Image (spheres, helix red, strand yellow):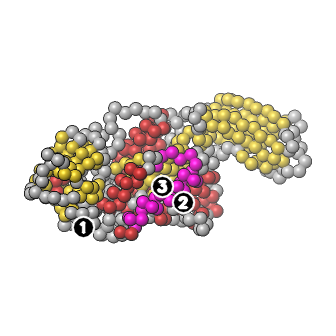
Amino acid sequence: MSLFAQKIRITEAPEDYQLYARDSSNTAEVLISGNIKGTPDFKEFSLKVFKDNMLYNTQKDSLVDKKFSVSTKINSGLHEYRFEFYIKKNNVDSLYFSANHVVCGDAYIITGQSNSHASSSLSTYSNPYCRSFGVKTGYETYNDADRKVRWGMATGNLEGLDGVGGWFKKNPFGVGAWGMELMRLIVEKHQVPVCIINGGSGSSSIEKNMLYPEQPSLETSFGRLAYRVDQAGLKDKIKAIFWHQGESNSVSVESYQGYAANFDVLLNDWKRVYTSLEKVYLFQIHPGCGRNPESYLSEMREVQNKIDKKYEMVNIMSTLGVTGHDGCHFSYDGYLEFAKRIYPLVARDYYNEKFDFTITPPKLLSANYTGSKKIILNFDQSILLEEKREVNGVVHYLKDQFFASEDSNSEQMPLEVKRVDVKDNSLILTLKKASNYKFITYLPSKFYVGTRDIYNGPWLSGRENNIGALSFDRRSITQLKD
């Protein structure tokens, strides 16, 4: 560009490795435009477009009022485009700039706290059609060096990492281990390039992820993420946001009780900033994490259930029963399971994929007494019972993981269950003695009862999909009439 830099000003043009979001016709428009400062010494310009290194399109035009503009459409699919822009001076075409490895596909956001963006040294998969933009910085302010990092190939790894982690490290093009696996599944199955921009911040509360207009944008998690998406040209092209967060809001009554209202504000800001947003995929958190030993994780998970029920655009996915949980985070295989669980929802919503099995986690529909010694829990799908599991040398039984209370505010007591049976969509709890509890909870908040061991099974799960049933907290029990 040095020969012409003082005269020619580019206002819009593709960049190396850029992803353009496809429209409903499976294409995207690529525009090259600019203007001339001073008296132009050329009048004609041309654009050559190459698709997979084969000449695809050529356009020629002339300056109008010292301005130039040329556009072309590119198709979605596993194709890379190269753009070469020439100016004609003294009957000689001179290359002014080029952009290579440009693709057309879909764009998503992942954000939240540490489990939204964990990297892994085992995440070595790479694909030229998996893209990201900028630097995942966590809590660090986006600096001048970060701003120079533009488009590149996505990674689930982090330089120098051994194992799983990287929650507080800057990572160019980092999408996290499960983000990378989700991209792989989409690209390989549906032949569509994908961009994910991950804005997760380790240990962050929902408040840390919200928009604060009074603060400089690059000093907040919301602002840094929005800046990257805007610089990528995708603010009006994001299809969905994947949200894994909540552990840090389980530390106090005030924190979890204010969560629903804060999520409402956050969702409205997401929709205002990312104007094409259609879906939010929310992960119900696993027992564990949280800075307070006496946490309110059970209540927090129930808040997440209510958010899923309130908003049509929000779909919830369970993390219960995911392999490799270490008390807060997951193994590489566990993060692969994150992607495996959430992929069918994305494939259903955006790629017209059909499934011959249920793809959502089991949800409780109702809880009913039949007599005084039997409670029937009815789910939205056929369920599977894991009767017992040994953890740290102790055998724990599923029948002991239910709790009950007389009212919605009183302390919950372990429900004395004699036997648990499954029949299709129903779980039948046979009690040791007659009871008249009004509310029931599935799973302890964080620890096995009477221990400081973080709960990690046994689980209820979907019979068809082996996805852990969503936990629930203080659901009302109805007495069925004889």
Secondary structure that dominates the magenta span: helix
The residue beneath circle 3 is: 111
Query: Label 3 neighbourhood size at 10 Å, few (<14), some (14-19), many (20+)?
Result: many
Counting residues from the N terminus, which is met first, the one under dot 2 or under dot 3?
Answer: 3
Q: CA distance from mark 1 to mark 2?
A: 37 Å
The residue beneath circle 2 is: 222
Would you say 387 lies left or right of 196 here? Answer: left
Q: How many marks?
A: 3
Secondary structure beneath label 2: helix
| Residue closer to the observer: 57 or 449 | 449
| Residue 410 disc label | 1
Would you say 397 lies left or right of 157 here? Answer: left
Q: Write down the quadrant of residue 405 in the picture.
A: bottom left
Secondary structure beneath label 1: loop
Q: Write down the quadrant of residue 456 in the picture.
A: bottom left
Secondary structure beneath label 3: strand
